[in-house]
Image (cartoon, rainbow, N blue to C red):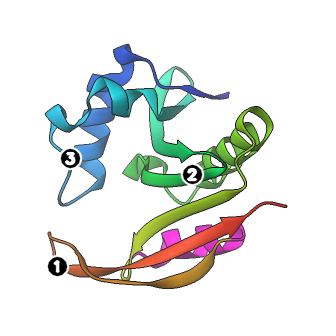
Amino acid sequence: MLQFRKMLPSDLDLVVRLEQECFEDPWPAEAFSPDIIETGYVLIKEDVLIGYVFALMVMDECSLINVAISPAEQRQGYGEHMMTELISLLRADKGIRYYYLDVRTSNIPAQRLYTKLGFKHLGIRKAYYRKPPEDAIVMGLIIP
């Protein structure tokens, strides 16, 4: 059974651990301030945290600043489920219509997922990522 919900402060250790598993240049634990935690949502599978997303919102826009699914759970539809739940929730509860994110040029599976969800390629951020150095593709989604 899957549960998508707001991140709780008690989820922090698991989110930090997952961050380290998923990214070559993970955020340090101290980057997860109370303000950042407040923007977080998590995906739970059978009482295990398997994914998270941080969504910074201003008016009717949302910047998805970090999206992760446990490596052991990737390519099984959980990322799509989490993103679909997030977009539906934010549209209904907060009136969010515009979504933006950055994705590594080499992260083809994530690009495919975002395209499947309706995101469009908006541009490139040169040398956006540090480890390893890489450009980011800026993608956006408009919900009518």
Magenta residue span: 107-118
Badge number at residue 8? none
Task: Give the mark nearer the N terminus: 2 vs 3.
Answer: 3
User: Quadrant of the rendered structure where residue 15 is?
Assistant: top left
Q: Secondary structure at mark 1?
A: loop
Residue lying furthest front: 59
Q: In this image, 43 relative to 91: left or right?
A: left
- Choose mark 2 or mark 1, whichever is in front: 2
Badge number at residue 27? 3
Graded by Cα atoms within 10 Å as few (under 14), some (14 to 19) or many (20 or more), the crowding at tag 1 reads few
- Choose mark 2 or mark 3, whichever is in front: 2
To which residue does mark 1 refer?
Answer: 133
Q: Secondary structure at mark 3?
A: loop
Residues at badges 2 and 1 in contact (C-beta under 8 Å)?
no
- The amino acid marked with disc number 1 is Pro
Q: What is the CA distance from the residue labelled 3 to the residue labelled 1?
A: 16 Å
Is 114 covered by the magenta stretch?
yes
Is 63 covered by the magenta stretch?
no
Relative to 122, residue 3 above or below: above
Location of residue 115 in the rendering, given as x and y in whole percent from the top left corner: 65, 75
Helix, strand or loop for the magenta stretch, by majority: helix
Q: Quadrant of the N terminus?
A: top right
Task: Give the mark nearer the N terminus: 3 vs 1.
Answer: 3
Location of residue 125 in the rendering, given as x and y in whole percent from the top left corner: 34, 81
- Which residue is nearer to you in this view: 78 or 27? 27
- Which residue is nearer to you in this view: 118 or 14? 118
